[in-house]
Image (tube, grey):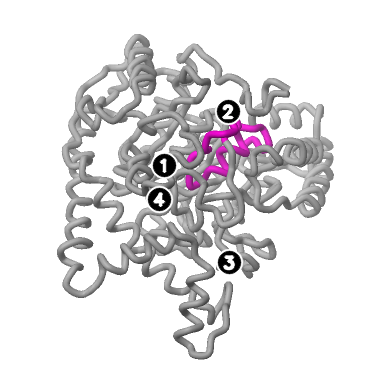
């Protein structure tokens, strides 16, 4: 099979009566069984429950065709479509680990709001995907359980922290998956795996039931193979949620309406001086070509500046670890999760957290605790938050001149396993282009814009104004229709 079906193609087939939900669920499960031994995208496959759910949808589809039931448009968006969830989203009765030993046997008593919404949309969850432990990483090498491989080159990383979700979609195991994005964890793996990933505006999608890393930065979003598919999923998972105090009171939108293919007079902002010296030459060439494609189609290219984004990585690695230090304090061996006994309460705490957390999680807890400690709070955490405000103001100024901002998703294509894991600073710099949008709370998308000489995908990132996902999707869809190339079949799967 050299081409994987999209959500839209599956829906069209089912609407015509050519296939039914159980056909696609069985196909997804078969692909997982055949392929995932190479990739390692899934931590848990939900085979029995997925098939039961799909057969129930088969019966519903029959009633629809006989006009015994009239479905609403919203319940048909994802009807019978198999999907996967990143394993930091709670699923009632189904283990949720955040790829950490400390939650190895945790079974949530409730589901995340996004999981509930996808169930209401009649999607079929086939499994939970791998990630960097507690979503802390850019390569999925930090999972406590296994490494996930890039389907385009098996000795390369898939990106992180949503590497399992991106790899599962790229390898055709599911047509879409959800990931979470704290500093680029949807967009960067989407770029590395040659698929499309959306980070919505902070507050657009409920975080209820997402295992927290950094609460002011985390956001859930879709990964799929076409812009139309991510728009369909985003429509289903967005909207105000009273269970999430940070959920914005924004109305749900039909994002597919913005997919006109028209880019004339769209103003594309380009940041010419943003860390250009650190960008791989092939990435730079692919981004320049993508901007030229948009310009040739009638888009207006304007130069903008984001001067304080040069400090985004430093600011992020104070804010995010500080929030992680606070959020992960709850894993103490008392209430839930792993518990390692000790002779004293303090010894139990020490043993539980020492054995339960991996190296990268420990590193960030220590950094965050230090940044929040007495005497250092003003010097580090407070100043990082002040810089965050300046970064947001830079974007506000830039968007006076343009509708979206274009830049690379990552400075290089996917790197080899172990290439950066020994040097945390080099790993952190992988998120240099994605972090600013998280600090500012803005929406962004990554979509393929080229292939390196080694056959590795290159991602174009488009950023937009707060709650203006429609314009971001419009620009992305317009480019997708114009780009003139198709992502090659993942050659890690050939043979």
Q: Quadrant of residue 328?
A: bottom left
How far apart marks 4 and 3 lie (CA) works out to 20 Å
Instruction: Please identify the quadrant where the C terminus is shown.
Output: top right
Q: Which residue is mark 1?
A: 420
**Which residue position is annotated with label 3?**
103
Q: For the stretch drawn in magenta, what is the main secondary structure?
A: loop
Compute the Cα span from label 3 to label 2. Answer: 31 Å
Numbered range of the magenta stretch: 150-175
What crowding class fits label 1: few (fewer than 14 Cα within 10 Å), some (14-19), or many (20 or more)?
Answer: some
Say which residue label 4 marks: 182
Tag shown at residue 436: none
Give whichever of discs 1 and 2 has the lower sequence position: 2
Query: Percent x, y for residue 42?
Result: 65, 47
Mark 2 Cα-neighbour bin, 10 Å: few <14, some 14–19, many ≥20: many
Q: CA distance from mark 4 to mark 2?
A: 25 Å
CA gap, disc 1 to disc 2? Answer: 19 Å
Going from N to C along the chain, the mark reached first, 4 or 2, is 2
């Amino acid at each position: 099979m050299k081409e994987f079906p999209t959500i839209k193609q599956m829906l069209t087939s089912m609407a015509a009566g050519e296939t039914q939900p159980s056909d696609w669920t069985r196909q997804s499960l078969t692909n997982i069984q055949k392929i995932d031994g190479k990739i390692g995208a899934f931590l848990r496959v939900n085979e029995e429950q997925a098939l039961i759910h799909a057969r129930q949808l088969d019966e519903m589809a029959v009633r629809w065709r006989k006009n015994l039931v009239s479905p609403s448009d919203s319940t048909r968006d994802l009807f019978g479509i198999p999907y996967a969830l990143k394993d930091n989203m709670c699923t009632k009765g189904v283990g949720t680990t955040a790829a950490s030993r400390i939650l190895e046997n945790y079974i949530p008593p409730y589901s995340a709001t996004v999981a509930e919404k996808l169930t209401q949309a009649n999607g079929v969850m086939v499994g939970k995907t791998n990630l960097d432990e507690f979503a802390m990483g850019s390569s999925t090498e930090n999972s406590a359980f296994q490494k996930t491989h890039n389907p385009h080159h098996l000795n390369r990383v898939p990106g992180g922290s949503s590497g399992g979700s991106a790899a599962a979609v790229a390898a055709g195991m599911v047509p879409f998956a959800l990931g979470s994005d704290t500093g680029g964890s949807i967009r960067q793996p989407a770029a590395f795996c040659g698929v499309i990933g959306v980070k919505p505006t902070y507050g657009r999608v409920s975080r209820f039931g997402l295992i927290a890393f950094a609460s002011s930065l985390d956001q859930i979003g879709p990964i799929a193979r076409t812009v139309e598919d991510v728009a369909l999923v985003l429509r289903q998972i967005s909207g105000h949620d009273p269970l999430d105090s940070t959920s914005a009171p924004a109305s749900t939108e039909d994002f597919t309406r913005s997919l006109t293919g028209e880019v004339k007079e769209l103003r594309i902002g380009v940041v010419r001086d943003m860390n250009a010296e650190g960008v791989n030459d092939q990435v730079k060439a692919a981004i320049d070509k993508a901007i030229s494609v948009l310009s040739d189609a009638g888009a207006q290219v304007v130069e903008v500046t984001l001067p304080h984004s040069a400090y985004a990585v430093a600011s992020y690695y104070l804010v995010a670890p500080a929030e992680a230090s606070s959020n992960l304090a709850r894993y103490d061996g008392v209430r839930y999760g792993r518990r390692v006994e000790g002779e004293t309460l303090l010894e139990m705490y020490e043993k539980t957290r020492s054995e339960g957390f991996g190296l990268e999680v420990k590193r960030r807890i220590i950094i965050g605790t230090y940044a929040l400690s007495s005497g250092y709070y003003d010097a580090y955490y407070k100043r990082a938050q002040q810089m965050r405000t300046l970064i947001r103001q830079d974007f506000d100024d830039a968007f006076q001149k343009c509708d979206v901002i274009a830049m690379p998703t990552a400075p290089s294509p996917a790197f080899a396993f172990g290439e950066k894991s020994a040097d945390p600073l080099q790993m952190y710099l992988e998120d240099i282009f994605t972090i600013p949008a998280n600090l500012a709370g803005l929406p962004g998308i990554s979509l393929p814009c080229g292939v390196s000489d080694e056959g590795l995908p290159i991602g174009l990132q488009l950023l937009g104004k707060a709650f203006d996902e429609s314009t971001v999707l419009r620009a992305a869809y317009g480019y997708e229709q114009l780009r003139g190339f198709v992502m090659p079949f993942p050659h890690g799967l050939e043979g």
